Every structure is written in structure tokens, then in C-alpha cells.
Amino acid sequence: MEQQITERMSEEHMDTYKMLVKYHNNFKRIANMYKKGNPKLSEEVNLVAEEIKKHLKTILK
């Protein structure tokens, strides 16, 4: 049979995924907002956004 079975996300998982996408986008916006005024803060916020992005990629696998 050698067919791959893919699991569908539940409604709760989809809601969590969408929420994480919103958080990622918001953190990126915040980082861009502080890029000139406070570069260190911008860098830290970008790190948080990238960490969220890593988790989003693992969810889709």
C-alpha cells in the first residue's frame, strides 16, 4: 500500500497556528518600527519573530 497518511489539523490547532502567524507578523512590525530609534530592541524583537517562525515551520511538517 505504501501510501503516506497525512494528519489534518483540528480546529483548535488551526486557531493556534493562525494566532502564531499574527504574533510573528506583529513582532516583525514592532522590530521595523524601532529599527532606527533603538536598534538593540529591534534586534531582540526580530529574534522572537524568528523563533516563532521556526515553530510555525515545524507545525507544517
Image (cartoon, grey):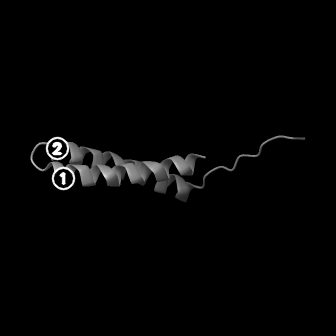
Q: How many marks?
A: 2
Q: Position of residue 38 (x, y in %)?
A: 12, 50
Q: Secondary structure at mark 1?
A: helix
Q: Is residue 46 left or right of residue 61?
A: left
Classify mark 1: residues with Cα within 10 Å, few (<14), some (14-19) or many (20+): few
Distance Cα–Cα, label 2 vs label 1:
8 Å
Q: Is residue 7 left or right of residue 61?
A: right
**In this figure, which residue is indicated by the disc labeled 2?**
35
Which residue does the image show at 90% across and 41% down from the upper left? 1
Q: Out of 16 and 27, give the one closest to the viewer.
A: 27
Classify mark 2: residues with Cα within 10 Å, few (<14), some (14-19) or many (20+): some
Counting residues from the start of the chain, the first of labels 2 and 1 encountered is: 2
Three-letter residue code for mark 1: Lys
Q: Out of 51 and 11, give the one closest to the viewer.
A: 51
**In this figure, which residue is indicated by the disc labeled 1?**
40
Q: Is residue 47 left or right of residue 54?
A: left
Q: Position of residue 57 (x, y in %)?
A: 51, 46
Q: Residue furthest right?
A: 1
Which residue does the image show at 23% across and 47% down from the upper left? 31
Q: Residue furthest front?
A: 40
Three-letter residue code for mark 2: Lys
Q: Secondary structure at mark 2?
A: loop
Q: Position of residue 27 (x, y in %)?
A: 29, 50
Which residue does the image show at 55% across and 51% down from the upper left? 59
Q: Position of residue 56 (x, y in %)?
A: 48, 49
Q: Residue furthest bottom?
A: 12
Mark 2 or 1: in front is: 1
